Image (spheres, rainbow, N blue to C red):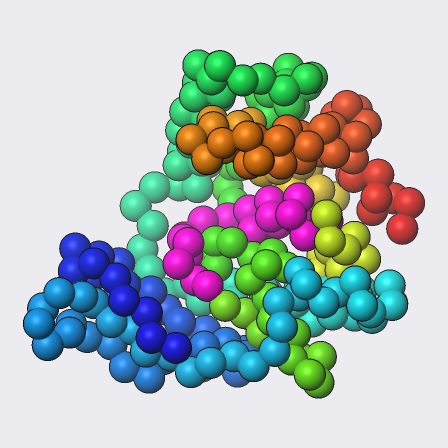
Amino acid sequence: MLKLSDLSKYEVKRLEYNYIKKVAALGITTSKPVDFGISSNNGYVYSLFTWVEGEEAELVLSKYSEKEQYNIGLRAGNILQKIHTINDYNCEKEWSEKYKQKIYKKIEQYGNSPIKFENDSAFINYIKENISYLDNRPQTFLHGDYHVGNLIISPKRDVGVIDFNRMDIGDPWEEFNRCVFSCRVSIPFVIGQIHGYFDCNVPDEFFRLMALYIATNTISSIPWAIPFGEVEIKYMMDNAKKVFEWYDGFKTYIPLWYREY
């Protein structure tokens, strides 16, 4: 697989290539780095990777039984746990400082948006009431977009990870904000992912923070969707409605689908 990028993105793509090397070194099924450099005419940065055989989890999970979906989720959670062992960097800011700035900016952007979703005040109130849980959180390497659309299931039902182009450094639990997208495909998978990540011993604080990260993403998803048109706006409005139902209007911080399962 050959990826070409504008020359201005050299440093970003070099960093991405080197981090994927570290992920592959953990024994995780992913696109293994082969070569990186600048094209002969100096027009592009190129990254060459091996191809991951299989199909997108988003497209094939529904073909499996709920038990197998859960087991695939377990494997995905184990893989994410391994990814988060990469922590060879220096963080200039505490996580709480970084993410609180992000929250205030996203709430401001949503406030200025011409489109609003129903019950938005419940989301904003939950965020403000639980913002202190961001204090003293660790920071690790993040995939940045860990959901069923970026996971590959091989013919042997191994799980592979692709698309690290949104990689970041931050609270490892923030990765679970993408559960919103995975839940639309398979709730048993998401529960398996949570159990696999925590070796079936999920701390209460995790659910509080997952709800905070999901609420924050939901608020920011509307201004993000507007430039892309009606289809994306409707998708994100739908998500907001589902999230409100999951958390019973944010009367609970443990989603109802987790309790029911």
The residue positioned 39% from the left and 36% from the top of the image is 98
Quarter of the figure with residue 196: bottom right
Q: In the figure, 251 relative to 142: above or below?
A: above
Task: Measuring from the top left, give residue 189's x and y in whole percent.
Answer: 76, 60
Q: Residue furthest front?
A: 230
Task: Measuring from the top left, give residue 60's x and y in whole percent.
Answer: 72, 67
Look at the image and say whether residue 49 sits in the magenta stretch: no
User: Which quadrant of the rendered structure holds the N terminus?
Assistant: bottom left
On screen, residue 25 versus residue 130, left or right, reads left
Q: In the figure, 107 relative to 162: above or below?
A: above
- Magenta highlight range: 163-183
The residue positioned 55% from the left and 62% from the top of the image is 150
The residue positioned 47% from the left and 28% from the top of the image is 226
Q: Foreground residue, 56 or 67?
A: 56
On screen, residue 74 versus residue 105, left or right, reads right
Q: In the figure, 97 relative to 187: above or below?
A: above
